[in-house]
């Protein structure tokens, strides 16, 4: 998709579809809508007053061949209440325009910014939203795929906006949007195609294009290092495990002495059957996306390599397949972790925390001073928060607060759960230092307490994105399938854009 900006009169822009947002509270009486209504000889106002179009969030209605405009179609988009307007909502509105344009087979779309404030930031999130909305999950369909993509997206800004700054912002938005498209594609891939080896190959190929150095630790190297928890999870599968390490090349050249090093660690279970503690068959196909945290880290690192982050950042993705076999780890097994602590495996379906724990501990060996992990870790967080918020826990409260504050920009909502010391008792083991699950209570918290054992005193944030990785219903601004949740949070946290 070609993304550009236009300033001046939107009435003079020749395009297939012009998107215009209308707020619920006062939209019809605003000067902007009145001007549109005059241009269209009252057609926009008539549609609104008839009740056929209501400016409720994401509702939309088309006017074909609108008088007074060079656009072939005018799309009125409900923007909801103006008091709830944010950059995150603007991103969605741009995506809604693209989804309707795709349905109408429109190739060129112009989108009018609904407010005049912060045009540079607005342009960036519109670019992100357009790419998000233009994405489809039909990776392997052989029919009905051609002719739907929007090819050109024009962001219409006010006359006073700096064209150079807007263009730079659009480029940043395109970098972020394309990185999240890559993230979503990985999570949508079926597990027979996206194996741990294939994930490592794609990381190497994509990283090489943007300035990432990619190192892949193989099974033999992990055995020498003593990453026995990660290896235990992979034992049941014929697919070899991989530990993917991502570094931004320009940051390796002359790191400032004493500068913090952030490690982003993403769970990369390319398929999770539960192992010997096998899952129910219903919806097991969704477990292809159990590597969504790893995909988010890879997507974020691809974007950050191009955006020049304000801090040194590395990424780690422990990638395995969790299957039952005669070689698989069993409930009751005890393994020694990379850190040296012994772990009693109670459930082989609590595998994500095992691979993350070894990777987090190894990141500290690499010099990480701060840790952030992203994982589809527990069903318990879905029971607690549904698919509206992800869970966030950890010991780095300043970063937690910043991530949650950024949600008004990223659109990725997170709710903080407690991490009191009393929860540690649930994962005490009779025969080892710790066990990998407790009882049925507080499952998301005790999973985080398990990870905390391996980060020790290193400042750490944990994002449990289970329930946020896939969207089965579709939304007005996005296709069904993988959401890419977590990637935008990480990108914004470290790039500041």
Image (cartoon, rainbow, N blue to C red):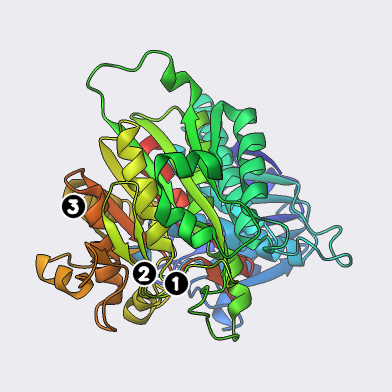
Which of the 4 image quadrants contains residue 457? top left
The answer to whether residue 260 is above or below residue 12 is: above
Report the quarter where the C terminus lies. top left
SS type, badge 2: loop
Q: Nearer the viewer, residue 304 or 374?
A: 374
Q: Which residue is mark 3?
A: 395
Relative depth, front residue between 233 and 64: 233
State yes or no: discs 1 and 3 in contact (Cβ < 8 Å). Answer: no
Q: Is residue 159 above or below residue 410?
A: above
Give the label on residue 345, or none. 2
Front one among 27 and 467? 467
Residue carrying label 1: 348
- Which residue corresponds to the image point at 53% horizontal and 73% vertical from the top-left? 275
Earlier in the chain: of badge 2 and badge 3, it is 2
Q: Are marks 2 and 1 in contact (CB under 8 Å)?
A: yes
In whole angstroms, how far apart are the C-alphas of marks 1 and 3? Answer: 27 Å
The Cα atoms of the two marked residues, 2 and 1, are separated by 7 Å
Q: Residue at x 54, y 29 (%)?
A: 212
Q: Name the N-terminal-most of marks 1 and 3.
A: 1
What secondary structure is marked by label 1? loop
- In the rendered image, the quadrant that contains the N terminus is top right
How crowded pointer 3 is (Cα within 10 Å; few <14, some 14-19, many 20+) is rated as: some
Q: Residues within 10 Å of mark 1 (few under 14, many from 20)?
A: many
At 21% across and 43% down in the image, what residue appears? 458
Tell which tag, 1 or 3, sits nearer the viewer: 1
- Taking the image as shown, residue 101 lies to the left or right of residue 408, namely right
Q: Residues within 10 Å of mark 2 (few under 14, many from 20)?
A: many
Q: List x then y, in percent, for residue 34.
A: 51, 61
């Amino acid at each position: 998709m070609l993304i550009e900006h236009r300033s001046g009169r939107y009435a003079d822009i020749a395009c297939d579809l012009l998107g215009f947002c209308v707020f619920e509270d006062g939209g019809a009486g605003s000067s902007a809508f009145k001007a549109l209504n005059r241009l269209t000889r009252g057609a926009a106002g008539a549609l609104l007053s008839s009740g056929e179009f209501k400016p409720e969030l994401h509702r939309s209605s088309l006017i074909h061949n609108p008088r007074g405009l060079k656009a072939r179609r005018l799309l009125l988009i409900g923007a909801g209440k103006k008091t709830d307007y944010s950059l995150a909502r603007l991103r969605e509105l741009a995506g809604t325009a693209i989804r309707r344009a795709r349905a109408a087979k429109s190739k060129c779309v112009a989108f009018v910014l609904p407010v005049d404030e912060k045009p540079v930031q607005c342009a960036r999130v519109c670019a992100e939203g357009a790419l998000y909305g233009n994405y489809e999950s039909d990776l392997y369909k052989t029919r009905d795929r051609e002719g739907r993509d929007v090819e050109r997206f024009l962001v219409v800004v006010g006359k006073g906006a700096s064209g150079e700054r807007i263009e730079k912002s659009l480029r940043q938005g395109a970098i972020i949007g394309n990185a999240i498209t890559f993230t979503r594609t990985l999570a949508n891939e079926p597990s027979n195609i996206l194996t741990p080896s294939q994930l490592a190959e794609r990381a190497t190929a994509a990283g090489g294009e943007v300035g990432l150095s990619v190192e892949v630790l193989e099974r033999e190297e992990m055995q020498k290092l003593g990453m026995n928890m990660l290896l235990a999870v992979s034992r049941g599968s014929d697919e070899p495990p991989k530990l993917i390490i991502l570094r931004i090349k320009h940051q390796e050249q002359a790191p400032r002495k004493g500068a913090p090093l952030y490690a982003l660690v993403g769970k990369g279970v390319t398929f999770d059957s539960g192992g010997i503690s096998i899952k129910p068959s219903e919806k097991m196909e969704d477990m292809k996306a159990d590597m969504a945290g790893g995909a988010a880290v890879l997507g974020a690192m691809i974007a950050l390599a191009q955006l020049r982050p304000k801090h040194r950042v590395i990424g780690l993705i422990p990638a395995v397949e969790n299957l039952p076999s005669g070689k698989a780890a069993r409930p009751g097994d005890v393994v020694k972790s990379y850190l040296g602590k012994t772990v009693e495996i109670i459930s082989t379906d609590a595998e994500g925390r095992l691979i993350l724990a070894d990777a987090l501990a190894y990141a500290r060996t690499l010099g990480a001073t701060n840790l952030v992990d992203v994982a589809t870790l527990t069903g318990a967080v879905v029971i607690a928060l549904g698919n509206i918020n992800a869970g966030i826990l950890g010991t780095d409260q300043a970063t937690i607060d910043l991530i949650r504050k950024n949600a008004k920009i990223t659109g990725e909502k997170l709710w903080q759960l407690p991490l009191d010391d009393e929860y540690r008792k649930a994962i005490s083991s009779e025969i080892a230092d710790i066990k990998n699950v407790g009882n049925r209570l507080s499952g998301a918290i005790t999973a985080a307490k398990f990870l905390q054992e391996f980060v020790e005193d290193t400042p750490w944030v944990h994002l449990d994105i289970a329930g946020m990785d896939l969207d089965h219903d579709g939304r007005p601004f996005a296709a069904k399938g993988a959401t890419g949740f977590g990637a935008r949070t990480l990108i914004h946290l470290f790039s500041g854009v």
